[in-house]
Amino acid sequence: MGRPEPSVVELDQVRFRWPNQVSDIISIDELTLHAGEHLFVRGASGSGKTTLLNLLAGIHVPSSGALRILGTDIAALAPSRRDQFRADHIGIVFQQFNLLPYLTMLENVTLSCAFSKRKQARASADGGVHDAARRLLNALNLPDDLHRSPVAELSVGQQQRVAVARALIGGPELLIADEPTSALDSDNRDRFLELLFQEAEAQDTTLIFVSHDPHLAGRFDRMIELADENQGERVGL
């Protein structure tokens, strides 16, 4: 029997509420994710999906309970160290992509490494940061002749794949995707998910994917459903 995969995410009695609120917007008793697992998080608008992602990314800290990423209690870190921890270990695909329109596709992808010496070293280990970015873009079906195009000239689907490459460069242990398929039709959505899984698996990256679309849940190892009206969370398979 092989050794179990190490824990990447551990939540223990995590609660979060905004100041002056009387009820918790997040209430999770226990959740553990191991290296390479894929978790689907579903919930309606206002159910706390974005709040949960911000907790996992260290943008917010729990009101109570323990939240550990790679064994580190990120709430115990100073804000500047949380920011650096996020830059070193977490990749994020934002719903609106948050690409810089005046930069090229290649420049947007390599930008992640400018904020993390760790990611820069990992990306450089096999030929350099730009070579790593090109390999990711090519793997995501974005050919060389587009790599120096400003992202403002790209289609929505192409911009989305650039955002994924930027999140994956440097081999982050945790990848968080915030409703990245909301603007895609079903065919493009399915192809995008195949590419996302392929690249996450190639790097043994743990994936947390947020969406309100229940039809996607069956593609993932596990699911959490955030209940409507901020009544906590439900866990299912």
Image (tube, rainbow, N blue to C red):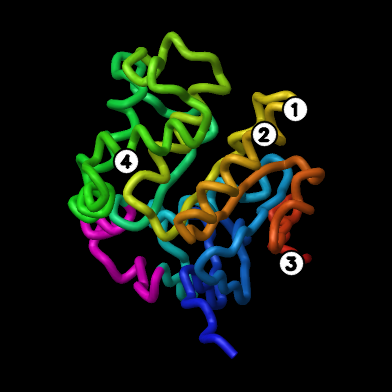
Q: According to the image, label 2 marks what residue? A: 191
Q: Nearer the viewer, mark 4 or mark 3?
A: 4
Label 1 to label 3: alpha-carbon separation: 28 Å
How far apart are the alpha carbons under marks 1 and 2?
A: 6 Å
Asked if 120 appears above or below 65 in the picture, the reply is above
Tell me whether the residue at label 1 lies in contact with that at label 3, contact meaning CB atoms closer than 8 angstroms.
no
Q: Which residue is mark 1?
A: 187
Amino acid, disc 1: Asp
Could you tell me what secondary structure mostly forms the magenta stretch?
A: helix
Disc 1 to disc 4, C-alpha distance? 28 Å
* Magenta-tinted stretch: 70-86
Q: Which mark is residue 55?
A: none
Q: Quadrant of the N terminus?
A: bottom right
Which residue is denoted by mark 4 in the rendering?
132
Q: Quadrant of residue 40?
A: bottom right
> Residue 16: within the magenta?
no
Give yes or no for contact between labels 2 and 4 (Cβ–Cβ under 8 Å).
no
Q: Nearer the viewer, mark 1 or mark 4?
A: 4
If you read the primary sequence from the N terminus, does the residue marked by circle 4 or circle 3 appear first? 4
Q: Earlier in the sequence, mark 2 or mark 3?
A: 2
- Disc 4 secondary structure class: helix
Closer to the chain start, of discs 2 and 4, is 4
Q: Is residue 142 above or below residue 3?
A: above
Can you give x and y, in whole percent of width and height, for residue 203 in the image?
Answer: 45, 56
Q: Is residue 77 magenta?
A: yes
- Taking 153 as reference, is 109 left or right? left
User: Looking at the image, is mark 1 or mark 4 earlier in the sequence?
Assistant: 4
Query: Label 2 to label 4, Cα distance in Å?
Result: 22 Å
Mark 3 belongs to which amino acid? Val
- At x 20%, y 40%, the residue is 114
Q: Which residue carries the number 3 mark?
A: 235
Q: Are marks 1 and 2 in contact (CB under 8 Å)?
A: yes
